[in-house]
Amino acid sequence: DGGITQSPKYLFRKEGQNVTLSCEQNLNHDAMYWYRQDPGQGLRLIYYSQIVNDFQKGDIAEGYSVSREKKESFPLTVTSAQKNPTAFYLCASSIERAGVNTEAFFGQGTRLTVV
Amino acid sequence: AQSVTQLGSHVSVSEGALVLLRCNYSSSVPPYLFWYVQYPNQGLQLLLKYTTGATLVKGINGFEAEFKKSETSFHLTKPSAHMSDAAEYFCAVRGSSASKIIFGSGTRLSIRP
């Protein structure tokens, strides 16, 4: 089945540690996104990538890093510089096709808790 | 720049009543618009999307949305609410096929028996 896989579903991290969230897609989509979701704040864009080896900062990139070495993979690292990392993280992907309204497909999310 | 405003963080309706969730957008170009639904602890699922030329868009689960350019609105409706419609709903916009997708803050829909 085609889709987006995020792992793990639940993740616990000690303060001061870096942690990497995995996102893999087999939809052959060009673009991939990372969003952070907090109660009452909707989805806020952390990073997005429209092509391999290229990515752009979103609205809340501070304390996060990404890589896009393969089309299928877009891992997100939450660094110790992120002051309040406890949140629900969503990965998404979409086709990039000029003149066509293509939606984003989402993974099931990773809930990160700092303990 | 594109932005989305969802009016009402929480909407409660009775089962069988009309559902109306409001979304207004701001875009410097003809926008691409979406409505998504999210159930607890899950990802987002597409309900419907606006494609230029059709102002009334039908989606899954009996939902539809009407694009009104003069009002910069894309409100989501369903004639008769069902208990299974209880979820969080997000309106989203992108300014072109190659731009990032911006989400609203979401509206939580509750259904009263």
Image (cartoon, coloured by chain):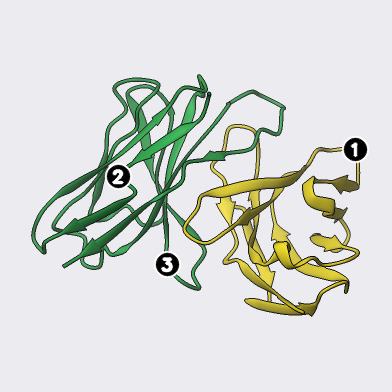
Which residue sits at x=62%, y=58%? Answer: B3
**In the figure, is residue A53 to the left or right of A102?**
left
Mark 2, Cα crowd under 10 Å, few <14 / some 14-19 / many 20+, is: some
Is residue A47 shown above or below A2? below
Chain designation of label 2: A
Residue on which disc 3 sits:
A38
Find residue B34 and report its horizontal and vertical position in percent.
Answer: 70, 48
Q: Colour of chain B?
A: yellow
> Nearest the camera: A63 or B95?
A63
Which residue was labeled with disc 2? A8
Which residue is label 1 attached to?
A: B53
> In the picture, residue B50 is in which quadrant?
top right
Q: Is residue B30 above or below residue B5?
A: above
Q: Amino acid at mark 2?
A: Pro
Chain ID for green? A
* Label placed on residue B4: none
